[in-house]
Amino acid sequence: MLNALAIPHVGPRVATILAEEFGSIAAIRDASQETLSAVAEIGPVIAESVHAWLTGDYGRHVVAGLQAAGVQMEMPAGHRARRDGPLAGKTLVVTGTLAGYTRQEAEEAIRSAGGRASSSVSKKTDYVVAGAEAGSKRAKAEKLGVPILDEAGFCELLEG
C-alpha cells in the first residue's frame, strides 16, 4: 500500500522494508527522520522524503481519505519483521535454483527466522544461499569472502 502513495524515492522494496519494520502507516508517520534512516537500506534522502510526505498536509489528507474508505493501514502481524530468531540481524541473498523453495519462499523463510533477504551481495551480506546455476552473485560472494551456503546449510541455519 505504501508504494501506491507515490512518495518520492519509495518503490516496492523500500515500501516493504518500511512496512515490515514499522507495521503501520501511523507508525511510519510518527517515526523521526533519524529513526527512519536507521533502518537498513533507508538512508537520509529516503527518510526525509517519507517523513515530509506523511507529515505534510497533502499526505495526511490522502491517508485520512484512504482510512475513511476502509483501506487497511497496518501490516498483518505475521508479516512484520521479526527481531528474534536464528537469523536475527543477518542479511542473506538467495541465488540460483533451490530444490525445496521458490525464491519467494526462501526469502519468506529468512524473514520468518528474523533475517533480512537482500537482492544484492555486498560486504554487509552475512550469507549467500546458492542453489543450482548460481552465477554472478555467487562469484561476487566468493570475491568478497561472504560465506556461501548450499540448500542443506540454509536449512540448518533456519533451524538454529
Image: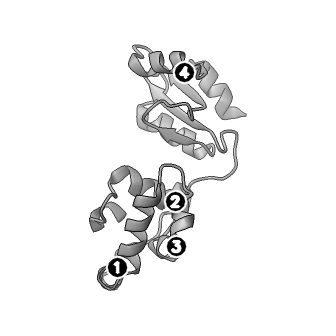
- Which image quadrant: the C terminus? top right
Residue lying at the far front in this picture: please name it: 44
The first of marks 3 and 2 along the sequence is 3
- Where residue 18 appears, as percent x and y from the top left, is 47, 59
**42 to the left or right of 58:** right
Q: Residue at x 46, y 75 (%)?
A: 29
Q: CA distance from mark 3 to mark 2?
A: 14 Å
Q: Which residue is mark 4?
A: 144
The vertical placement of 23 against 88, above or below, is below
Give the residue type at disc 4: Leu
Q: CA distance from mark 1 to mark 3?
A: 13 Å
- Disc 3 crowd rating (10 Å Cα; few below 14, some 14-19, many 20+) is some
Residue 107 vs residue 144, the one in the foreground: 144
Give the residue type at disc 3: Ala
Q: CA distance from mark 3 to mark 4?
A: 36 Å
Give the residue type at disc 2: Ser
Dot 3 falls on a residue whose secondary structure is helix
Q: CA distance from mark 1 to mark 4?
A: 43 Å
Q: Residue at x 43, y 14 (%)?
A: 132
- Where residue 50 appears, as percent x and y from the top left, is 40, 67
Q: Which mark is residue 63?
A: 1
Location of residue 102 by image quarter:
top left
Q: Which residue is mark 3?
A: 27
The first of marks 1 and 4 along the sequence is 1
The first of marks 2 and 1 along the sequence is 2
- Where residue 112 appears, as percent x and y from the top left, is 58, 45
The vertical placement of 42 against 63, above or below, is above
Marks 3/2 in contact by CB < 8 Å: the verdict is no
Location of residue 113 by image quarter:
top right
Q: Which mark is residue 37?
A: 2
The first of marks 1 and 3 along the sequence is 3
The first of marks 2 and 4 along the sequence is 2
